[in-house]
Amino acid sequence: MNTWLMLSAGVLALLAVAHSIIGERLLIGPLTRRDDLPGMRGDGLLAKRTLRFAWHITSAFGLGVAALLIVLARSDDDVATPARIIALTLAASGLLALVIARGRHPAWILFFVAAVLAWLGST
């Protein structure tokens, strides 16, 4: 078993769960209680539901990538290429979070940690 990939999966799963729980409490919940959101097709409820599912689908994808890392960690096959693709994707996500939020959102740290762990697991 590849410990680095398992650790990367754990960090990413933690990030995904925290993203949904904290984001729902601090951002999505308050936004969807507002009455001044622009409507989609004349329907404010659709806009609110779209915000909610778009937010949580990001977490679902994070859990999916974590599951892929676990499969790779348990594989006896050469995992270098897929693990490196995931590592680079995580690093790009960390860079986006760092630059766009100007370092004020802590997700970039966990993305970079998961990226480094995944890269170490690819060697």
Image (cartoon, rainbow, N blue to C red):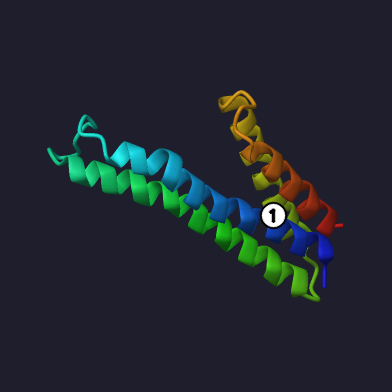
Q: Residues within 10 Å of mark 1 (few under 14, many from 20)?
A: some
For image coordinates 20% across by 39% down, the residue present is 40
x then y, percent, for residue 108:
66, 37
Q: Residue 87, can we see it?
A: yes
Q: Secondary structure at mark 1?
A: helix
x then y, percent, for residue 42:
12, 38
Position above or below: 30 against 59: above
Count of marks placed on residues: 1
On the rendered structure, is 52 left or right of 95? left
For image coordinates 15% across by 40% down, the residue present is 41
For image coordinates 44% across by 53% down, the residue present is 57
For image coordinates 64% across by 65% down, the residue present is 68
On the rendered structure, is 7 left or right of 13? right
Q: Residue 122, can we see it?
A: no
x then y, percent, for residue 105:
60, 32
Type of the residue with mark 1: Val
* Quarter that holds the C terminus: bottom right
x then y, percent, for residue 30:
34, 38
* Quarter that holds the N terminus: bottom right
Q: Which residue is mark 1?
A: 11
On the rendered structure, is 20 left or right of 118? left
Q: Residue furthest right?
A: 123
Q: Residue furthest top?
A: 102
- In which image quadrant can residue 76 be found? bottom right
Position above or below: 32 against 6: above
Q: Nearer the viewer, residue 35 or 79?
A: 35
On the rendered structure, is 30 left or right of 69? left
Position above or below: 44 against 18: above
